[in-house]
Amino acid sequence: MILDSKGKLFGKISIIDILVVLLILGVAGGAFYKFSKSGTPGVFTQLDKIEAVLYIEDTPEFVVQAMQKGDIAREVVQNAVFGIITDIKAGPSVVFGVNDQGVWVKSTRPGYISLEVTVQGEGLYGNNGVSFANALFYVGKSYEMKIGNGYVYGRIKSLKKVQ
């Protein structure tokens, strides 16, 4: 008989032991599948040094006072850290509107500026964007960002791997 009176398979292995081993194998297989397919870096994955330039086209002038070199820049929704601020460049604000002739024109607003904030951090550089803290980011996409103590809406102007 396959099961004996003590509940052992072929008189050697308990059915409970077999179920526990199958459960452990199932959990291990699920974890392997999740980490190999999700783009999540593994424990021994070497991260790339990434330089990102963040562009904010129109923000109040006082916001730049809340940012300084050495502060952390992060994306707010996914709470992903881009890195440490290495440079801040201010310029005239950029806004678009319709003039009296109905033509779209570029102009500026008093009391507002544009910013280019350069940050360096660690992420995974790939063909489909850069992954910071397991979230993918792309050039040109708009994000809510906390840069230093400033809160802004802007875009990623460039992403590059640094040696």
Image: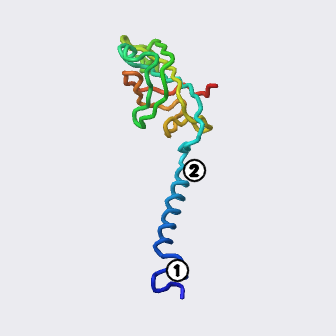
Callout 1: 10 Å neighbours few (<14), some, many (20+)? some
The x and y percentages for residue 31 are: 51, 54
Examine the image and state in which quarter residue 95 appears.
top left
The quadrant of the rendering that contains the C terminus is: top right
Name the disc covering residue 9, or none. Answer: 1
Examine the image and state in which quarter residue 128 appears.
top right
Instruction: Establish if 49 lies above or below 95.
Output: below
- Residue drawn at point x = 58 percent, y = 28 percent: 49
- Residue drawn at point x = 40 percent, y = 36 percent: 77
Say what amino acid the circle numbered 2 marks: Ser
Say what amino acid the circle numbered 1 marks: Leu
Q: Residue furthest right?
A: 163
Q: Looking at the image, is mark 2 or mark 1 nearer the viewer?
A: 1
The x and y percentages for residue 59 are: 39, 19
Instruction: Establish if 132 lies above or below 15.
Output: above
Q: Nearer the viewer, residue 134 or 156?
A: 134
The x and y percentages for residue 38 are: 53, 48
Instruction: Establish if 10 lies above or below 162.
Output: below
Examine the image and state in which quarter residue 33 appears.
bottom right
**In the structure shown, which secondary structural element does the residue marked by tag 1 occupy?**
strand
Q: Which residue is mark 2?
A: 36
Report how many numbered discs are placed on residues in the image. 2
Q: Residue furthest bottom?
A: 1
User: Is residue 37 rendered to the left or right of residue 151?
Assistant: right
| Colour style of the rendered protein structure | rainbow
Q: Nearer the viewer, residue 14 or 83?
A: 14
